[in-house]
Image (cartoon, grey):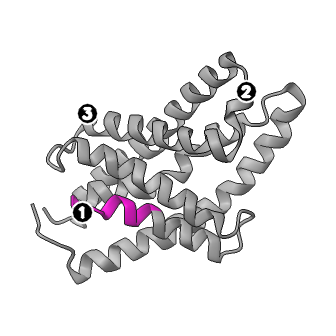
């Protein structure tokens, strides 16, 4: 395992933040559209859980690319920062959300000791990110006021979203970057 970030790593990490900041900004339009569609049938809050996986992609990608403590947090936080500077609807609150999402993804890598980088890690990162972000939304978005059945559905949907976007899609991206020799091991 590498001992720290090199200049090339810092540049790639910044690029991850910029690229995902733009993706996160665009995801807000998807979120708003889903909220509009789901609100009349009582599932408007579910839009957050459906799109959560998109907003949690930068951290796991950085974690798998650099395999260093802090990389996952920095990737997620930088993406949220760029999203904020692009003028996203949540403003500076993006920094808090990015930090929370970054802590969730970083915890997943911490539990694997920064040594295992396979499907087990994807599951652990997905689970930790789901738990941490759901706990944050419990307070921030008032999830404590929803019925138990709704909460169960929301956490399952969130887990699936994070697994598909931040797990499976990121794994495919990492595999392509590996084959292209962008990642040095």
The one nearer the camera, 174 or 72, is 72
Determine which residue is flagged by label 1: 66
Q: Residue furthest bottom?
A: 7
Residue 124 x %, y %: 32, 36
In the displayed structure, does residue 47 sit left or right of residue 79? right
Q: What residue is shown at x 30% (from left), y 63% (from top)?
A: 70
Question: Which image quarter: residue 46?
Answer: top right
N-term mark: 3 or 1: 1
Task: State whether residue 18 is above or below residue 34.
Answer: below
Determine which residue is flagged by label 2: 146
Find out whether the residues at labels 3 and 1 contact each other: C-beta distance under 8 Å. no
In this orientation, does residue 77 appear?
Answer: yes
Q: What residue is shown at x 28% (from left), y 54% (from top)?
A: 64
Q: Marks 3 and 1, how far apart in space? A: 18 Å
Q: What residue is shown at x 35% (from left), y 46% (from top)?
A: 172
The stretch of residues the image draws in magenta is 66-76
Question: Which image quarter: residue 50?
Answer: top right
Q: Which quarter of the figure is the N terminus placed in?
A: bottom left
In the displayed structure, does residue 18 sit left or right of residue 109? right
Residue 2 x %, y %: 11, 66
Determine which residue is flagged by label 3: 120
């Amino acid at each position: 395992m590498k001992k720290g970030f090199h200049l090339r790593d810092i540049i790639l990490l910044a690029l991850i933040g910029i690229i995902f900041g733009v993706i996160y900004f665009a995801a807000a339009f998807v979120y708003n559209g889903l909220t509009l569609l789901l609100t009349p049938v009582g599932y408007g809050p579910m839009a957050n859980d459906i799109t959560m996986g998109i907003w949690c992609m930068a951290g796991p990608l950085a974690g798998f690319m650099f395999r260093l403590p802090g990389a996952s947090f920095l990737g997620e936080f930088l993406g949220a920062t760029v999203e904020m500077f692009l003028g996203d609807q949540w403003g500076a609150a993006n920094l808090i959300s990015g930090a929370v999402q970054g802590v969730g993804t970083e915890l997943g890598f911490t539990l694997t000791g920064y040594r295992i980088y396979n499907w087990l890690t994807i599951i652990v990162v997905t689970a930790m990110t789901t738990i941490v972000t759901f706990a944050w939304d419990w307070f921030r978005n008032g999830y404590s006021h929803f019925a138990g059945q709704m909460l169960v559905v929301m956490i399952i949907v969130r887990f699936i979203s994070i697994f598909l976007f931040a797990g499976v899609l990121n794994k495919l991206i990492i595999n392509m970057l590996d084959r292209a020799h962008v990642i040095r091991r």
